[in-house]
Image (cartoon, coloured by chain):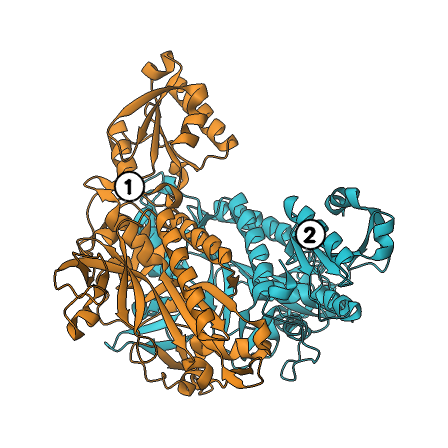
Chain colours: A orange, B cyan
Amino acid sequence: MRQSQIFTRTLKETPKDERSINAQLLIRAGFVDKLMAGVYSYLPFGLRVLKKIENIIREEMNQIGGQEALFPALHPKENWQRTGRWQYPEMFKMKSRAGKEFSLGWTHEEIITPLVRKFVKSYRDLPLAIYQIQDKFRDEFRAKSGLLRGVEFIMKDLYSFHKDEKDLDRYYEKVKKSYFEILKRCDLEKQTFLTLASGGTFSKYSHEFQTVTPYGEDEIYICAKCRVAVNKEIIREQPLCPQCRSKKLEQRRAIEIGNIFKLQDKYAKAFSFSLKDKQGREKNVLMGCYGIGLPRLMGAIVEVHHDEKGICWPKEVAPFRAHLIQVENTSKIKKATEKIYRYLQNSRTEVLYDDREDRTPGEKFADADLIGIPIRIVISEKTLKQDRVELKKRSDKEIKLIKTKLLNSHLIKI
Amino acid sequence: MRQSQIFTRTLKETPKDERSINAQLLIRAGFVDKLMAGVYSYLPFGLRVLKKIENIIREEMNQIGGQEALFPALHPKENWQRTGRWQYPEMFKMKSRAGKEFSLGWTHEEIITPLVRKFVKSYRDLPLAIYQIQDKFRDEFRAKSGLLRGVEFIMKDLYSFHKDEKDLDRYYEKVKKSYFEILKRCDLEKQTFLTLASGGTFSKYSHEFQTVTPYGEDEIYICAKCRVAVNKEIIREQPLCPQCRSKKLEQRRAIEIGNIFKLQDKYAKAFSFSLKDKQGREKNVLMGCYGIGLPRLMGAIVEVHHDEKGICWPKEVAPFRAHLIQVENTSKIKKATEKIYRYLQNSRTEVLYDDREDRTPGEKFADADLIGIPIRIVISEKTLKQDRVELKKRSDKEIKLIKTKLLNSHLIKI
């Protein structure tokens, strides 16, 4: 992609109404634009990152047998009355001209449970796992943390259906592992703690995936002894580690990027979704639900992976693999840089080509650091004489000179 | 994909509350589920078709220089007041707990115009074309035509920005061509008429893309002489062909799957989006907008491409390329069919494998016809002896016996 043709541009000033690092950097670098508190537009670079994250999640969900579907955002009142959640204060509600009442979904148990009930007629059809990646809405009083707390936000929500507790437990553990696979690919694995949270009426605990960063909205407590993490809610009930009973707990700020719950038969009961077991006894179907907020994950990546100059995208979620920069506007350098651009395109390397002629090299380098593409490639008169290109990793200070014809094998290795 | 593992199933009965062919077939075949009037869930097969259509549109939009972005569904009241469209009766409106008023977008001029204004500071940055594929909402009184008239629906909306009329005209023609490219790939080109519609205050005509089918919601009039199509609105004003003045017009029912408008400076004016031209004169930016409803396109494909047994998906939008059917549950046939399944997977053919053991061959063939995958493959004792497989096109009656090792080259050719 040619940078001269993209309609966005980097901003010199930090937006005044954003206090969070993720929003400041993502707006300045041209990834997102704020429409209003908690509601952002994804601009071309931002959408590329979002799609990368989406694909990582999709691959991992398919890996654990998830079947992808897409459910509506608009929900009829009746479904939410059935579970007693119509009055949920953070749910947007509205009335049609014909007088019908709707809400905007912030979760989809009320939609998926009666839907699956239509198709599943025997316990032999279970287990089953269905997910979607879809737009959600929440009437937030305080939407101040950029992408971390959205009023409108894309979520991956997976729902699983089981014939008994043992099978639900088995799948729950599988999802845990899958989430760490996703975190690994987003380079957040080391910073993220599987955190005990209250499990509500049915299970002792649910789990949150909390990414530790200095400006996270949540507080978690990490046991100094056994490294189990616990959320604030649980600590308020019992101020000690639930696993080893130690009272030595380190407080950390963190971002909840995902959570997993055993719903047991709460929703099956509400929608009369029961099946006969092997012995012919009617039993409610058991369910689990598993969420990941995509903007939160994107925001968390920026909070963790940045420096004073800008964002440092991890390889798998970066908008491009390489940032090719034309440092001089002489026909010789232009020709050589164009040649490398075509070469990279032909080898299917995703490359952003800074071909803008009205910027100084210094401005271009500053933009490259702000945008945060993992590898920077520069061709100058000097490198051209040696038949080499200059290669710099965003995360390193060192500049390497490598032979032009070895560029591709280098890019693969890095 | 193994059919035994998919949670949906085909339905024997036509849903009573659906009168349109597209919804009847799509529901019976397990592509979509109706949540309420005008609001559908996309089940795994349906989502596959939707994604294929999405990718066709994305490729064609990129081809004409479109930059993809993603804008919010939730809009602040102020933007719509600015253009005088807040009172639009089909727009859903709501209030947050904090008293802020929002609407749900059915189009995005009110969002994209001020956004682009932030970035574009010179006429040299134009032309510019930005699009998204995104969920839209419309408070419809009558949502009775299945996927053809949605209360919630995914749309591709492209907006273009120009420095003068000539450039807007040039791009408008480019989009027209691009739309016919999309229609060709969806096998709707022959049935679709570029139809003159009223252009509002600024241009004499806008254009609709109307696909002729017996149950379309719209009426168009095709000039028997010059084959120009005109919509009802225009005919009401002047009951003759606007091109050749002929009064011989054939009335047809049709589905409006897309439309294109020259917006001129209506929205630039509302948001004070002007730029200095070469001569230093301040001029409003000119805009065009270009929509395609994805569910409508999907519904139109079904209305056009079906027979009494079910859907006949065109190649490029089919959920799978081939439907492999295991007709006997003997270990010999199972083994041979599994082998073909792996072979097709390895050659990256998208294949649905009907490995269900509790269905008769007759039930499986009926399901295959209903689901409508372009090619059906069957292995039986008889074909196995000859080292051949049975191959049938959904659109043909003829069954061909082809050598197993030539299967792949056959699939590519068809």
In depth, the one of B289 and B387 nearer the eye is B387
- Who is closer to the viewer here, A227 or A321? A227
The N terminus of chain A lies in quadrant: top left
Query: As rendered, which of A96 and B329 lies closer to the eye?
Result: B329
Mark 2 surroundings: few (<14), some (14-19) or many (≥20) residues within 10 A: many
Determine whether label 1 and label 2 are within 8 Å by CB: no
Kind of residue at badge 1: Cys
- Residue B45 placement (x, y as % from top left): 61, 63
> Residue beneath label 2, please?
B341
- At which x and y percent is residue B256? 61, 66
Give the image quarter of residue A293: bottom left
Q: Which residue is mark 1?
A: A312
Give how far across and how far down residue B217 sits, in percent.
64, 74
- What chain letter is assigned to the residue under label 2? B
Label 1 crowding class (10 Å Cα cut-off): few <14, some 14-19, many 20+?
Answer: many
Instruction: Give the CA distance from mark 1 to mark 2.
Output: 43 Å
Chain at numbered mark 1: A
| Horizontal relation, residue A234 to residue B260: left or right | left
The answer to whether residue A269 is visible is yes
Give left or right: position of B397 versus A230. right
Q: Is there any visible trace of residue B247 in the rendered image? A: no
Residue A358 sits above or below residue B206 on the image: above
Q: Quarter of the image holding residue B239?
A: bottom right
Q: Is residue A20 left or right of residue B124?
A: left
In the image, what residue occupies the spot 46% across and 24% down?
A339
SS type, badge 2:
helix
Q: Residue at x 59, y 66 (%)?
A: B296
Left or right? Give the position of B93 relative to B42.
left
